[in-house]
Image (spheres, rainbow, N blue to C red):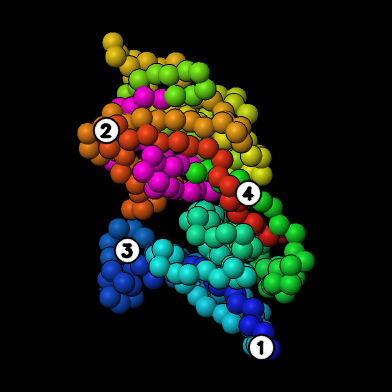
Amino acid sequence: MSVVAPRVVLVTRQTEYERLLAHHGTRAQASFFLAGRGQDIDLVERAHQRFDAAVALLLRAVPLEWRRTRIDRRDLDRFLFEPDDTVVAVGQDGLVANLAKYLHGQPVLGVNPDPLAYDGVLVSLSPDAASALLRPTVEGHADTRSLTMVEAVLDDGQSVQALNEVFVGHASHQSARYRLLAGKHDERQSSSGIVVATGTGGTGWARSICMQRRMRAELPEPCERRLAYFVREAFPSIATGTSLVDGSLDAQERLEIVSEMNDGGVVFGDGMEGDHLEFHFGMRLSIGVADRALELVKA
């Protein structure tokens, strides 16, 4: 009986250098463009070289008898992950968040190719450390953290899952109008939208909201099955209130939102505006802790 070889899926995104070349055609033209704005292409190119070196090191670490494939972030929605894949994300923290909703328990090694440029909250492994952890991960011996995810489900069955946060609001800068139902509380609101964040998201957008409001809110821990929600710039009027501007949801609680937007209402996760659900007048949205979690390999 044949045994299928393990598969390592390397997930990356274009570097700034690659985007410059794609836009301007040649290095010389890209350099001319940047120089005219007081910028140096050498800095961008060196960052690209560090990224390439990290990818090359990781590919060399994959045994020859294993299967391997590399995909770009832009192709995630068209790629079919296998249940036993080991996923290696090389780049910024946001790359791990972008791929989380496409996985169902596959372990992820987050690799930071440029520690001076990226915080490394989700990409905490150096290329050397990740290379050493490849075999233990494939064999099921690596330690992982189960990072809580958030899920938003429309009344027609469509859904969005996210690792950091879900945003509900208007696609433009117009006010979003809706009814917000949290526990026994029910309020019509007009605002810049609602952010529902996990503990992982508490290191990003939710943290910025708390800092801007000078709040001392206890944001969830990344592995805690709890969410925090924030209403952005709620507007008080004769028809809309501002009493439900933030709160938390445990694993059994749901935040309910009923759209009062005739057009432009959207729901999306982790900043992926292009991959959104339309949220028309009368539609009902339920947001809570997702059943799935992201299995991130520990450093």
- Give, as a three-letter code, the residue at label 2: Phe
Q: Which residue is mark 3?
A: 34
**Farthest residue in the left direction?**
262
Upstream in the sequence, badge 3 or badge 1?
1
- Residue mark closest to the camera, 3 vs 4: 4
Upstream in the sequence, badge 4 or badge 2?
4
- Residue mark closest to the camera, 4 vs 2: 2
Q: CA distance from mark 4 to mark 1?
A: 34 Å
Q: CA distance from mark 3 to mark 1?
A: 54 Å
Q: Please report the residue visible at 65 percent of the width from the left and 57 percent of the height from the top.
A: 296
Q: Position of residue 238 (x, y in %)?
A: 28, 10
Q: Position of residue 21 (x, y in %)?
A: 33, 72
Q: Position of residue 45 (x, y in %)?
A: 44, 70
Determine whether label 2 and label 1 are within 8 Å by CB.
Answer: no
Compared with 89, 244 (above or below) is: above
SS of the residue under disc 4: strand
Q: Please report the residue visible at 45 percent of the width from the left and 36 percent of the height from the top.
A: 286
Numbered circle sitting on residue 147? 4
- Give, as a three-letter code, the residue at label 1: Ser
> Between residues 151 and 175, which one lies in front from this camera angle?
151
Tell me the quarter of the image containing the C terminus.
bottom right
Determine whether label 2 and label 3 are within 8 Å by CB.
Answer: no
SS of the residue under disc 1: loop
Residue 270 placement, left or right of 61: left
Q: Which residue is mark 2?
A: 281
Q: Is residue 154 magenta?
A: yes
- Residue 251 visible here: yes
Q: Residues within 10 Å of mark 4 (few under 14, many from 20)?
A: many
Determine whether label 3 and label 4 are within 8 Å by CB.
Answer: no
The magenta span reads 152-180
